[in-house]
Image (spheres, grey):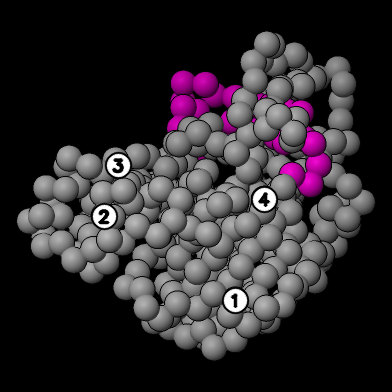
Amino acid sequence: MAVHQLPATAQTVHWGYFDPRQAPALTVASGDLVAIETLTHHAGDAPDLLMDEHISRVFDEVDERGPGPHILTGPIAVTGARPGDVLQVDILEATPRLPYGSNLAGHWGFLYKEIPVERVTVYELDVEALLGRALFGYDWTATPLANEPGTIVTPDPARREPALPGVVVPLRPHFGTMGVAPADPVRVSSVPPGDHGGNVDNWRIGAGGRMYYPVQVPGALLSVGDPHVSQGDGEVSGTALESSLNGLLRLTIRRDLPFTVPVLETATELLVHGFGDSLDAAMKCATLRTLQLLGCHFGLSRADAYSFMSVAVDFTVTQVVDQRQGVHGRIDKRCFPRWHNPAA
């Protein structure tokens, strides 16, 4: 088993898209570890706090951006991976690079009609205590920040106002966007999630979690980015608490799993993700996918699975702000003692 280093540089990131035609930044064998750097595209919200010289260099040197806003590190090719396989990604570490993060309430936020302002709130992170505290907030009144990926806001102390006095936020570092290359030979935005994974925005995709992605193209071509240090289910303002992360991943090809959609495993649960143009559509997608998984992975009949879902599966809104809305179904692995095998 080898350990590979994948720093985030202008040569190893791609900004705002997945594309199966892209050459890999790194090639590894199944079972190898990758120490990976991921950068937040919100570093420009407070460059004096959220940027170091290497992050600044990426912002300066990467001109090709969009159609999405996310900075993705990769892609990583896994030797031997082929369509029909499943790529298992074990997240062993996810550590903040700098002790600050940013949340933007954007014009695509769920309540923008009720709160029609773009508001940036910058937090200081206590990594040891796993807590965040707001340092300040400011309103952004120029061109919407999301319209220009990588906008750098000149620090202006006069505009920075106190925010959330006496409030602490629990930190749960995770990768908002991670996935394999989609099958179609075109560039697709990093914003909407899909069967390749992508911008799933489930805060449980952090250290101790294990993601399963159905491989769509030879090599799988995994990309990772949109790092978060905290998020609530829903992500209602439009963003999480965005902050650059260093991660340690183990990549393994699996040919013994029936998963055809992104599935998350933790020590205690399996989470099945569904997406749609509305919450009703995302809910329908998540329930049908959970029904399928209960049959193909646990051997339940459709009638038994339908009953089990109603009495034991929690369906929760993942996010409502990524063009395609998301719902995940949570299956407690204790319900299936014969299959119970906690994630490493």
Amino acid type, callout 3: Phe
Foreground mark, 4 or 3, reads 4
Residue under label 1:
31
Q: Earlier in the sequence, mark 1 or mark 4?
A: 1
Sort mark 3 into few (<14), some (14-19) or many (20+) by Cα contacts within 10 Å.
many
At x 19%, y 47%, the residue is 309
- Separation of marks 4 and 3 at Cα, in angstroms: 26 Å
Q: Earlier in the sequence, mark 4 or mark 3?
A: 4
Foreground mark, 4 or 2, reads 2
Amino acid type, callout 4: Ala
Residue 94: which disc? 4
Sort mark 4 into few (<14), some (14-19) or many (20+) by Cα contacts within 10 Å.
many
Foreground mark, 2 or 3, reads 2
Whole-percent x and y of residue 63?
A: 78, 63
The stretch in magenta equals 96-124
Residue under label 3:
315
- Separation of marks 1 and 4 at Cα, in angstroms: 19 Å
- Separation of marks 3 and 1 at Cα, in angstroms: 32 Å
Q: Identify whether 134 is placed above or below 192.
A: above
